[in-house]
Image: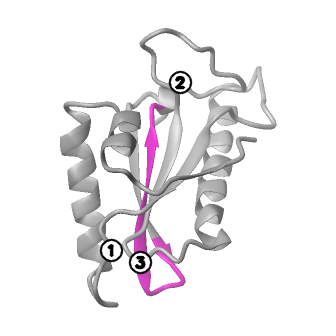
Amino acid sequence: MLSKSFLLFPVNKSGNHWGVIIVCYPYRLGPRVEAVEGAPCPVILYLDSMRSRGRQDYCYIEHMRAFLKTLWNGLHTDAQVETLAIQGFCLSPPQQPNYDDCGLYVLKSMQLFCLETATSMPVDILETHNCECACINTH
């Protein structure tokens, strides 16, 4: 799983709403990510079409970070880590006008991400879409 370029996870919020987490470049995960020219850094993106912009949104990134750490430690039993060097961002994709269409917005967000990564890096996508990003601490 961590050998892939991107991981996409639909996320159920409170049993009645859906968002999506996208993990970019999980193959670069580790306790430290060395800056290498032209090599992407891993990042966690959270997209929600009814984003509340509250601390609750960041908990999904924290849960994903914990999940990735568990996966990484399972694959590297000789070098367990307490933390992974990966940033997380909450993005504001197009917002749904009602309380019923979140599943469609999740699918559309995933589709757009997949189509756009064919021509640009996720960091470029963040900049070109003028997404409202809020960086959370890396652990």
Left or right placement of residue 103 versus residue 92 in this view:
left
Residue type marked 3: Met
Q: Quadrant of the N terminus?
A: top left
At label 1, the amino acid type is Gln
Q: Is residue 4 left or right of residue 85?
A: left
Residue extent of the magenta highlight: 12-25
Name the element at disc 3.
Answer: loop
Q: Amino acid at mark 2?
A: Arg
Quadrant housing the C terminus: top right
> To which residue does mark 1 refer?
95
**Of the numbered discs in the image, which one, if any, rests on residue 28?**
2
Q: Which residue is mark 3?
A: 50
Could you tell me which secondary element the residue under label 1 belongs to? loop
Compared with residue 56, is residue 123 higher up or lower down, i.e. above or below?
A: above
The stretch drawn in magenta includes residue 81:
no
The dot on residue 76 is none
